[in-house]
Image: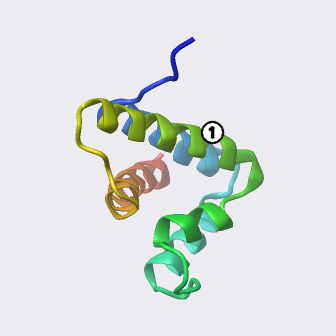
Amino acid sequence: MAAAMLNPESFARTLESMVEEAYKRDRGDDLARIVKRVLDGTHPKEVTPLAALMFMVDQEFLHPLQEAIDALRRWYEKKGNPISDGEVFGLMMEIYAAAAKAAQKA
């Protein structure tokens, strides 16, 4: 069985649904605190922002999030253009900002 791949649009929809779920569970503030801590650079400097984020994410979201990131990486690798941790993190922050804004309005 072939490993799953997510193009950037599918990756965005997957992350958007995770953010929506967090807000539905009244966990949006927790998610915002995690993102703020990583963006503020208060995470250990020995790890990338993506690694710090993954370390702080709740266990229930960790596995699906890691699967989505891995699937996105496979898509980029298949295209011959591997994506770095920094690029994945930047994409995630763009998706998070839009999804969190939409979830707060709902």
Where is 94 relative to 13, above or below? below
The residue shown at (35%, 32%) is 75
- Describe residue 64's horizontal placement relative to residue 39 as left or right: right
The image quarter containing residue 51 is bottom right
- Describe residue 42's horizontal placement relative to residue 12 as left or right: right
* Residue type highlighted by circle 1: Pro
Q: In which quarter of the image is the N terminus?
A: top right
Q: Looking at the picture, tell me which residue is in the foreground, 42 or 13.
A: 42
- Describe residue 55's horizontal placement relative to residue 100 as left or right: right
Label 1, on which residue? 64
Q: Residues within 10 Å of mark 1 (few under 14, many from 20)?
A: some
Where is 2 relative to 88, above or below? above
Residue projecting furthest to the right? 59
The residue shown at (54%, 76%) is 47
The image quarter containing residue 81 is top left
Q: Looking at the picture, tell me which residue is in the foreground, 94 or 23.
A: 94
Residue 82: % across, % down: 30, 46
Residue projecting furthest to the top? 1
Q: Is mark 1 on a helix, strand or loop?
A: helix
The residue shown at (35%, 64%) is 86
- Describe residue 92's horizontal placement relative to residue 3 as left or right: left
Residue 89: % across, % down: 40, 60
